[in-house]
Image: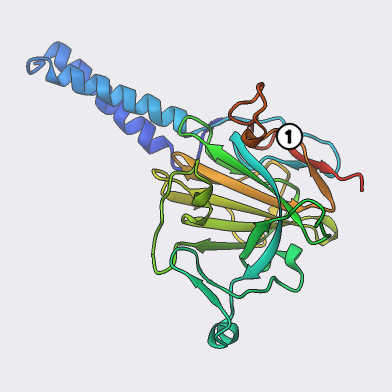
Amino acid sequence: MGGLAHGGHAPVLIPLMMGGSALIIGATIDSLYGFIPLFGIFCLMLSAFCANFWRDPDRPIPRDENVLVSPADGHVMFVRRERATGRRPNKEQLASGECESDTLTGDWYPEPLEHPLQFETEQRFEPVKEGEESNDDVFRIAIFMSPLDVHVNRAPLAGTLHRMEHRAGKGLRRGPFLAAYKKESQYNERVRSVFKGEEELMIEVTQISGAFARTIVPWLGVDSEVRRGQRYGMIRLGSRVDIRAPARLFTPNVVSAEEQNSSHPKGEFVRAGSTILFIPSDS
């Protein structure tokens, strides 16, 4: 049953009660030159905004076989075929002197994982040029969530929440917090989750904080069983969610803003748990 997401009741009810009380006091006792009624109206408006932000509607979940549903509400920023070109180093690799360092994104070992589609750690991805495709490529779909969208995130497939890690910019406890609609925001403070489905299929979903959305709240822990479309967390205020899936198994099923389609100038609007982002590949 739809309603408010976890943590949303206090932000809605407290200003609602304060606003109602202020209006009653202003009408029956003393308005203080209109200040108390104005304060009451402000509180009611704040309560309405919070109710809209924390809303968590029920969604019809597709029953099609072998599809991946959207983990977030929002417009599709881009769809990109990518390949891993590096990974986060372990202690031995970091001490080898072979790592590349970036002031924002941190340290990278310039080789992908032995099995890059297992997403065992965060990897550095680069776009694949036409004609250079391989079986280790992934498709990435980036979804921009405005402050007015539903911010509850859902599992793209049925299986297990296999891995989860929190990352920030190099040397930062929190941040950076670039605007989520910018492509560079992929290295904002983020939580990377890997969902494992049947036949060891791994799907990577990254919740990315925005300029104002600075709190990512997971609701499930590692090894939790999930259903397709099940709620597993949320991001507070405007933000972004990226999903990566093996290119040899899936084909994107959405229109991005980069395609400049007149029917979807901002990119197709997708809904968490309901919109099918990927369909099985024919190849």
Where's residue 29, x and y in %? 10, 15
In percent of the image, x 44 and y 44: which residue is there?
Answer: 179
Where's residue 162, x and y in %? 68, 62
Give the side of residue 71 with respect to residue 245, left or right: left
Q: Is residue 166 visible?
A: yes
Q: Name the colouring of the figure.
A: rainbow
Give the side of residue 266 with respect to residue 189, left or right: right
| Up/down of 126 relative to 156, above or below | below
Return the residue nearer the eye: 240 or 226: 240
Instruction: Identify the secondary structure beneath mark 1.
Output: loop
In percent of the image, x 19 and y 19: which residue is there?
Answer: 38
Return the residue nearer the eye: 197 or 261: 261
Return the residue nearer the eye: 52 or 277: 277
Q: Find the residue positioned furthest to the top.
A: 27
Where's residue 155, x and y in %? 67, 46
In percent of the image, x 69 and y 47: which residue is there?
Answer: 80
Q: Is residue 218 visible?
A: no
Residue labelled with disc 1: 61
Where on the picture, by quarter, is residue 87? bottom right
Give the side of residue 9 with respect to residue 68, left or right: left
User: Can you say which quadrant of the picture contains the N terminus?
Assistant: top right
Number of marks present in the image shown: 1
| Up/down of 231 relative to 160, above or below | above
| Crowd band around label 1 with a 10 angstrom C-alpha radius: few (<14), some (14–19), many (20+) | some
Q: Amino acid at mark 1?
A: Ile
| Up/down of 152 relative to 185, above or below | above
Where on the picture, by quarter, is residue 224? bottom right
Where on the picture, by quarter, is residue 213? top left
